[in-house]
C-alpha cells in the first residue's frame, strides 16, 4: 500500500513535489516487504579469508566442508562389554583378550569365545555383536555368561555416519559449536569463511550525553548507540562506535565521512524525521549515497532511511529507542547477514494470544513487543510508543499485525519472532 508523504521541510507540498520530481518515488512510503526486498537485493558479499577452525564460531562458511575420511573409520564398539558371536549367546564363553580404545585387536573371536572390549575400541574379527557388561555374569576369571535374552549389535559400523569426501557442512552455514566438532573430525582446520562485516554506529542529537554523564535539563542519555552496539555484537560482527554528531550539517557530515572510511555498514540514529535539525538525508545525498527509501509503512520505525554507496550501506534509523531496536532486527540484521554470506531466515514460532489486543489505527504494519508466558501464550507488553525505553526489557518476542487489522483475539494464533 502506498501513502503520499507530504512532510517536506518546504511549507508548500506542491512545490516540494515538483522540485523532487526525479526522485518521485522517495515521497512514497513503501511497504515493509518492499523495503526488506530492496535491502536484501542491495547486499554485496564481503571477501573471504582462511582462519583457524577453533576461531570460526559465528563466522559464515565460504566453502563446502568435505570429510577426508569415513566416520567411524572402523567398526567400533558402542558400549563397554564383550565382543562375541550371536550364535554363542546361550553358551558360556571364554574371554580371550581385552581390547582398550585406541588399540588394535590381536585375536580372532572363535566359537564360544569373546573379547572384553571398551567403548570406541575396534571390533575384533569373528565377532558380530557386543553384549553389555551389565548383562553379563562372570563365572570365573575368564569365563562369562550372557544373562539377558535379547541382543542388539551395539556396533557403530565403518562409514555409517560420514562417507569419505562427503559434504559435511554446506557453504553459507553460520558456524555453531556443533559445526566446530564436525570440522575437527573432518580434519578441516583452516576453513574459508567470509570476513566479519564492520558496522559503525553514530548517534545524532544536541540533546544527547553519554551514559556516564548526568544529563542537564533538556538533555537525555544516549541509549540507542549502545543498544545498537550490543545488537551488532550479538551477531558476532565488528561493532565500531563513532560518537555523537551534533545537530549541525558539519558535525553530521564529518562523522558520516569518518564512518565510511572503514565500515561496510553505517547505522545512524536520530536526525531522520522531519525536524528542523534533521539533516541526514540531505548529507547522504551530498556524499554520493543512493538513497533507496526514506519512509516505510511500518510501526515503529516509519522514518527509516536506507542508502547504498557502492559496497557500503547506510541506515538512518529513527531516534526513538524502540524503533531503532525493531528496525535493526527487521532490516539491519538481514543485510549484515546477507553481506556475510548467510541467508538468514528468521524462524517464527506459532503461538496463541494470551489476551485480546486492540489498536486504534491500522494504516501501517505494526510490530509489537510481547512476552511468551509459562503456558506458551503470547502476552503483549505495556507499550506507550516508540520512545518507551523499557517496553522491551521483559519482551522476548515481536509479533506483527498486518495493515487493515485492528484486533487480535485471545486464542488467535500469531507468529512470534524471538528477540
Ligand atoms: P530524532 O529522530 O532525532 O528526531 O529523535 C527522535 C526522538 O528520539 C527524540 O526524542 C530524541 O531525543 C530521541 N533520541 C534520538 N537519539 C537518541 C539516542 N541516541 N538515545 C536516546 N534517545 C534518542
Ligand atoms: Mg534528533
Image (tube, rainbow, N blue to C red):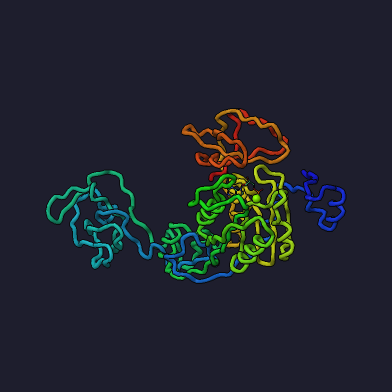
Q: Residue at x 75, y 47 (%)?
A: 29
Q: Position of residue 394 (x, y in %)?
A: 50, 39
The residue at the point 52 percent across, 53 percent down is 210
Identify whether 313 is placed above or below 359. below
Query: Residue 240 occupies which quadrant of the picture?
Result: bottom right
Quarter of the image with the N terminus is top right
Which of the two residues, 289 or 355, is positioned nearer the viewer here? Answer: 289
112 in relation to 309, above or below: above
Query: Left or right: 175 with respect to 102?
Result: right
The x, y position of residue 24, in whole percent, is 82, 54
- Can residue 399 be seen at all in this image of the molecule? yes
Q: Residue at x 61, y 64 (%)?
A: 259
Q: Quadrant of residue 243?
A: bottom right
Of residues 148 and 363, which is closer to you in this image?
Answer: 363
300 sits left or right of 195 in the view? right
Front one among 23 and 378: 23
Residue 203 point in image, percent of width and height: 60, 55
Q: Is residue 4 left or right of residue 147?
A: right
Q: How many marks?
A: 0
Amino acid at each position: 500500500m502506498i501513502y503520499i508523504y507530504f512532510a517536506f521541510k518546504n511549507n508548500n507540498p506542491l512545490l516540494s513535489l515538483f522540485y523532487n520530481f526525479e526522485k518521485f518515488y522517495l515521497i512514497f512510503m513503501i511497504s515493509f516487504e518492499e523495503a526488506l526486498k530492496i535491502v536484501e537485493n542491495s547486499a554485496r558479499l564481503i571477501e573471504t579469508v582462511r582462519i583457524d577452525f577453533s576461531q570460526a564460531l559465528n563466522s559464515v562458511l565460504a566453502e563446502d566442508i568435505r570429510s577426508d575420511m569415513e566416520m567411524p573409520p572402523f567398526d567400533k564398539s558402542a558400549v563397554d562389554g564383550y565382543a562375541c558371536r550371536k550364535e554363542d549367546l546361550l553358551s558360556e564363553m571364554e574371554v580371550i583378550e581385552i581390547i582398550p580404545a585406541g588399540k588394535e585387536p590381536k585375536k580372532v573371536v572363535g566359537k564360544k569365545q569373546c573379547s572384553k572390549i571398551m567403548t570406541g575400541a575396534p571390533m575384533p574379527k569373528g565377532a558380530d555383536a557386543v553384549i553389555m557388561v551389565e548383562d553379563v555374569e562372570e563365572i570365573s576369571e575368564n569365563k562369562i555368561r550372557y544373562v539377558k535374552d535379547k541382543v542388539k549389535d551395539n556396533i557403530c559400523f565403518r562409514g555409517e555416519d560420514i562417507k569419505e569426501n562427503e559434504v559435511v557442512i554446506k557453504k553459507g552455514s553460520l558456524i555453531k559449536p556443533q559445526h566446530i566438532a564436525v570440522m575437527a573430525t573432518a580434519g578441516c582446520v583452516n576453513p574459508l569463511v567470509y570476513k566479519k562485516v564492520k558496522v559503525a554506529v553514530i548517534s545524532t542529537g544536541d540533546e544527547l550525553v553519554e551514559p556516564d554523564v548526568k544529563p542537564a535539563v533538556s538533555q537525555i542519555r544516549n541509549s540507542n548507540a549502545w543498544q545498537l552496539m550490543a545488537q551488532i555484537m550479538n551477531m558476532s560482527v565488528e561493532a565500531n562506535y563513532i560518537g555523537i554528531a551534533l545537530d549541525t550539517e558539519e558535525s553530521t557530515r564529518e562523522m558520516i565521512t569518518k564512518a565510511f572510511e572503514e565500515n561496510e555498514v553505517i547505522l545512524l540514529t536520530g536526525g531522520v524525521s522531519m525536524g528542523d535539525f534533521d539533516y541526514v538525508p540531505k548529507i547522504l545525498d551530498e556524499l554520493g549515497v543512493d538513497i533507496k527509501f526514506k519512509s516505510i509503512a511500518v510501526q515503529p520505525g516509519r522514518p527509516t532511511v536506507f542508502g547504498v554507496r557502492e559496497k557500503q550501506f547506510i541506515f538512518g534509523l529513527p531516534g526513538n529507542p524502540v524503533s531503532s531496536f525493531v528496525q535493526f532486527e527487521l532490516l539491519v540484521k538481514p543485510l549484515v547477514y546477507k553481506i556475510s554470506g548467510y541467508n538468514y531466515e528468521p524462524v517464527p514460532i506459532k503461538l496463541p494470544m494470551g489476551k485480546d489486543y486492540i489498536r486504534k489505527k491500522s494504516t501501517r504494519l505494526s510490530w509489537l513487543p510481547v512476552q511468551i508466558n509459562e503456558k506458551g501464550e503470547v502476552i503483549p507488553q505495556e507499550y506507550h510508543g516508540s520512545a518507551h525505553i523499557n517496553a522491551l526489557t521483559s519482551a522476548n518476542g515481536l509479533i506483527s499485525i498486518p495493515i487493515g487489522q485492528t484486533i487480535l483475539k485471545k486464542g488467535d494464533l500469531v507468529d512470534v519472532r524471538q528477540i
